[in-house]
Amino acid sequence: MSTTPLPGIGVQYDLTTREQRHLSVIAHRDGARTVNVYRTDDPDACAQSLRLTEPETASLIDALAPSHHSPNLLSTTDLGLVAERIELSSVSHWNGRVLGETRMRTDTGAS
């Protein structure tokens, strides 16, 4: 990743992905962010630009890097409910069993 100061505007962060896609984020001095995605046939030509407010930016950051850092998180709600996927090995005692048979909710409170 590289950074470029933009006098009077903020800072631009440029990233090339593993798939050789060029992305940039402009961090504006007012807290807004602009996310730019560049064309694959011309990495200097912007294909899509999206300006985010400060709260939208915070939501995106939380979606990209949740505070609990669980790579298995599927979703969360305003009520504090969290859906998470947990992989089981093929030899796990729990593999192939119906959730009700596991007594998981009774024993742990999880469902």
Image (cartoon, rainbow, N blue to C red):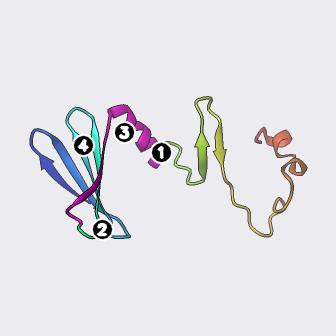
Q: Residue 23 sits in which quadrant?
A: bottom left
Alpha carbon separation for disc pair 1 and 2: 25 Å
Task: Give the residue drawn at x 77%, y 42%.
Answer: 111
Q: Amino acid at mark 3?
A: Thr
- The crowding category of the residue bearing disc 1, from other C-alpha atoms within 10 Å (few below 14, some 14 to 19, many at least 20), is few
Q: Amino acid at mark 4?
A: Ala
Q: Give the mark nearest the N terminus, 1 or 2.
A: 2
Alpha carbon separation for disc pair 1 and 3: 10 Å
> Which residue was labeled with disc 4?
27
Q: Callout 4: helix, strand or loop?
A: strand
Residue 58 x, y percent position in the rendering: 39, 37
**Which is more toward the observer, 34 or 80?**
34
Q: Which mark is residue 46?
A: none
Whether tag 3 and tag 4 are in contact, CB under 8 A, the answer is no
Whether tag 1 and tag 3 are in contact, CB under 8 A, the answer is no
- The crowding category of the residue bearing disc 3, from other C-alpha atoms within 10 Å (few below 14, some 14 to 19, many at least 20), is some
Where is the N terminus found, in terms of image quarters? bottom left
- The crowding category of the residue bearing disc 4, from other C-alpha atoms within 10 Å (few below 14, some 14 to 19, many at least 20), is many
Horizontal arrangement in the rendering, residue 59 relative to residue 26 (left or right)? right
Q: Which mark is residue 57?
A: 3
Task: Give the residue drawn at x 27%, y 70%.
Answer: 41
Whether residue 12 is situated above or below residue 81 in the rendered picture: below
Whether tag 2 and tag 3 are in contact, CB under 8 A, the answer is no
Magenta segment? 43-64
Q: Which mark is residue 63?
A: 1
Q: Give the mark nearest the N terminus, 2 or 4.
A: 4
Whether residue 69 is situated above or below residue 55 in the rendered picture: below
